[in-house]
């Protein structure tokens, strides 16, 4: 089953990269016609979430500390607050690689353990529940937000 989660996680990353090919750095942090989550914040959020997944799996955090407040403060900040598209895609790709490797190498018993963060435990009782969601549906919902943002921005989709 792990290989299916990793397949989806990799597919999500490829889909994100392809969907943003024709989006310029200048456009990345624009909020369009009521679509709140622009791609710059979305990529930052996904990279941060993947880093949280990595730390849940026992890895050290590698998410840039200077980006943490920007990620937490949401998409309504000045566009200059956000890293470039290239930086964000590189960070997301790096986090994906770390998580995919950690999930692949993890002992299956790890996924049955209680989720360590009490604030999330009601939603994700186990580490496996959390990982399955973060590697699949979480990114999928944000891929949909990017598509809606592109439509609102009138940027042609090739995905």
Image (tube, grey):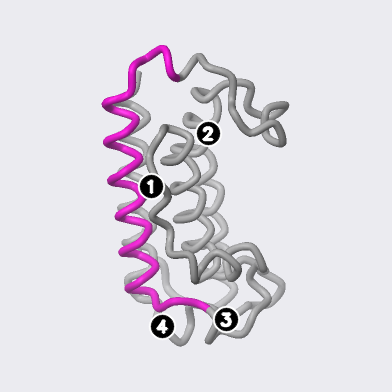
43 within the magenta span: no
Percent of width and height locating residue 42: 53, 62
- Pointer 2 residue: 133
Percent of width and height locating residue 67: 50, 69
- Distance from Cα at disc 2 to Cα at disc 1: 13 Å
Q: Image point 54% across, 31% down: which residue?
A: 130
For residue 146, the mark is: none
Percent of width and height locating residue 139: 49, 47
- Pointer 1 residue: 12
Q: Is residue 97 left or right of residue 28?
A: left
91 within the magenta span: yes
Image quarter in which the N terminus is found = top left
Question: In front: 125, or 21?
Answer: 125
Mark 4 and 3 residues: CB-CB less than 8 Å, in contact?
Answer: no
Question: In front: 103, or 145?
Answer: 103
Q: Give the SS element for disc 4.
A: loop
Mark 2 and 3 residues: CB-CB less than 8 Å, in contact?
Answer: no
- Distance from Cα at disc 1 to Cα at disc 3: 22 Å
| Main SS category, magenta section | helix
N-terminal of the pair, mark 4 or mark 2, is: 4
Mark 1 and 3 residues: CB-CB less than 8 Å, in contact?
Answer: no
* Quarter-of-image position of residue 5: top left
- Pointer 3 residue: 30
- Pointer 4 residue: 25
| Tag count | 4
Percent of width and height locating residue 35: 66, 69
- Distance from Cα at disc 4 to Cα at disc 2: 29 Å
Q: Nearer the viewer, mark 2 or mark 1?
A: 2
Q: Image point 39% across, 45% down: which residue?
A: 60
């Amino acid at each position: 089953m792990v290989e299916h989660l990793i397949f989806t996680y990799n597919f999500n990353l490829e889909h994100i990269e392809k969907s943003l090919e024709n989006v310029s750095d200048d456009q990345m942090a624009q909020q369009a016609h009521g679509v709140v989550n622009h791609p710059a914040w979305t990529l930052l959020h996904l990279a941060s979430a993947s880093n949280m997944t990595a730390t849940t799996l026992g890895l050290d955090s590698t998410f840039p500390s200077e980006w943490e407040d920007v990620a937490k403060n949401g998409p309504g900040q000045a566009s200059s607050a956000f890293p470039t598209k290239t930086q964000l895609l590189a960070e997301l790709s790096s986090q994906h690689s770390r998580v995919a490797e950690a999930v692949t190498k993890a002992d299956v018993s790890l996924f049955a353990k209680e989720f360590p963060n009490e604030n999330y435990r009601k939603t994700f009782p186990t580490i496996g529940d959390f990982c399955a969601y973060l590697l699949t549906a979480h990114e999928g919902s944000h891929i949909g937000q990017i598509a809606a943002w592109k439509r609102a921005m009138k940027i042609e989709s090739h995905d």
